[in-house]
Amino acid sequence: MSTTATTVPAGTYGLDNVHSSIGFAVKYNGIASFRSSFATYDAALTDGVLTGTADAASIQVDEPNFKGHLLSGEFFDAENTPTITFKSTDVKVAEDGTAEVTGDLTIRGNTQSVVATGSFNAGPDAFGNERANFELEATVDRREFGLNWQNALPNGSDALAWDVTLKVDLHFVKAA
């Protein structure tokens, strides 16, 4: 059973990759959202500081040409900037478990401060381990990170939205 924590516990917590995910959603063609995630990522929670990395080349897209476009210089430029990073600068948890995490996000070598909101919980699991969980969401303008590709639709509007919603569900286990 998990309990709502009002403070982030001290100590070092490693990522439980089986139960975690890092992904995003962006509206395309003005009618639907494209969603994807990264297969290779890591995160840690150390004395209240949340850090994480994702391998840009591990973006999960089954169509090779589309994936190649996303990895090219028009988007992630994975050959020159293979790693996406995050490091929190402030973590706030309210009594009801709502969380606000401010930190530095770096994509394509461009670092911007972002604020993610969501929830935080911590407590023991059924096997005696101490666990912690952040479920967070933030919206960023992809142009701030150098992801400037755009194409016009027949009606003149943009094919791909500038705003991207980042979603993380991070499960941590306290190191022994």
Image (cartoon, rainbow, N blue to C red):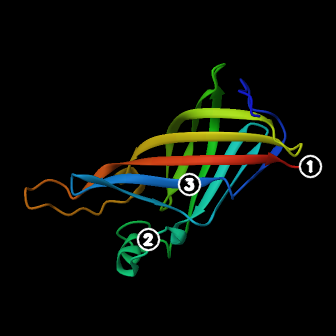
Residue ID for mark 2: 61
How many residues crowd around disc 2 within 10 Å: few (fewer than 14), some, or many (20 or more)?
some
Residue ID for mark 3: 22
Amino acid type indicated by mark 1:
Ala
Identify the residue at image location x=60%, y=47%. Answer: 169
Callout 3 secondary element: strand
Mark nearer the N terminus (1 vs 2): 2
Residues 83 and 128: in front is 128
Q: Position of residue 138 (x, y in %)?
A: 47, 41
Residue ID for mark 1: 176
Callout 1 secondary element: loop
Please give the count of numbered marks on the rendered protein. 3
Amino acid type indicated by mark 3:
Ile
Which residue lies most toward the bottom here?
Answer: 64
Quarter of the image for the N terminus: give it.
Answer: top right
Q: Position of residue 29 (x, y in %)?
A: 21, 57
Identify the residue at image location x=14%, y=60%. Answer: 153
